[in-house]
Image (cartoon, grey):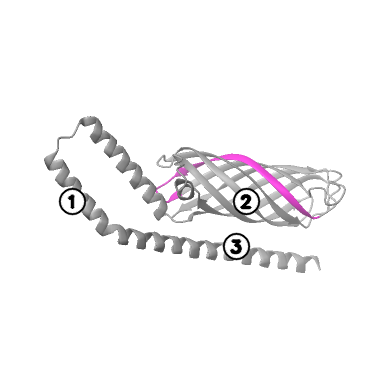
Amino acid sequence: MKNTKLIMLALAFSLLIFGFIFAGIIVSRHVKSVTGSQRSAEGSGETVKAEAKEVAKANLPRVGLENRTVSKESARSLKIEKQARKGCLSGIELLSGFGLAHLDGKGAYHVIPFYVDLDFDLKPLLSKIGIHPVGLLQFVEEPFLAGVSNPKGNLEVGNNFLIKIGLLPETSRIQPYFKGGAGFLYMSQHTLEQGTQFNFNEYAGFGIHFFLNKSLAFTMEYRYRHLSNAGIKQPNHGINSNFGILGLSYLF
């Protein structure tokens, strides 16, 4: 009976992953097609503006400071346009590692998680209200499946909603970041700390991307996780875990 439950949870998790990936790809392609149509419609207008600028440049002297101002504004406009072209779904990360906690009466709790991170760029949205962050800023949808090796074989399955904030410009080959958020999970392990097997979890951590090229990065991350059931049922003492994470990140 227990094996059947584990198989059903694994199948549900697989469907959840494929559903999120499919939805993300569809949304991303739709946004890219819309922005592409807008660019083609604006093409003729941009050509006219470019010709007008050439005429003005030929007839009117320019001051060096004005040239620098125009250059900065052009670079900023190009940057915003590039961000808009990226669409919503900007990357996928495959992450795994090891987590350690302690359970009352059962000792060490060892978790081996597998995360699929769907990274959604927030900068195009913020640019519409006049905010232009320089560094990485993403909303992360994170379905996950985790095997438990100690105190005995068990399983965790759930989903997290996270915010990732980069500390350096996106052009940097090394990108340190902070990540935090919350989610929910079902754990097959019965514990003395929790009166329910369905619980909520909060994450806080930091990591670093090492870019191998412009699209692929090696990722290292540390996470602290607090698990509780929000007072749904007693006891609700909470379980705290520390995670070390490694993986690969692919950017579109």
Q: Which residue matches tag 2?
A: 161
How many residues crowd around disc 3 within 10 Å: few (fewer than 14), some, or many (20 or more)?
A: many
Q: Is tag 1's residue or tag 3's residue first in the polypeptide sequence?
A: 3
Mark 1 and mark 2 residues within 8 Å of each other at the beta carbon: no
Main structural element of the magenta stretch: helix, strand or loop? strand
- As helix, strand or loop, the secondary structure at mark 1 comes to helix
38 over 236 or under it: above or below: below
Quick one: 135 or 215, which is closer to the camera? 135
Q: Is residue 199 left or right of residue 87?
A: right
Q: Which residue matches tag 1?
A: 51
Residue drawn 66% across and 63% down? 13
Residue drawn 73% across and 52% down? 149
How many residues crowd around disc 1 within 10 Å: few (fewer than 14), some, or many (20 or more)?
A: few
Using the numbered discs, state the Cα–Cα distance from disc 3 to disc 2 in whole angstroms.
Answer: 14 Å
Q: Which amino acid type is shown beneath numbered disc 1?
A: Glu
Residue 17, label in figure: 3
Q: Is residue 23 magenta?
A: no
The boundaries of the magenta stretch are 197-216
Q: Is tag 1's residue or tag 2's residue first in the polypeptide sequence?
A: 1
x and y percentages locating residue 59 in the rendered image: 12, 41
Using the numbered discs, state the Cα–Cα distance from disc 1 to disc 2 in whole angstroms.
Answer: 48 Å
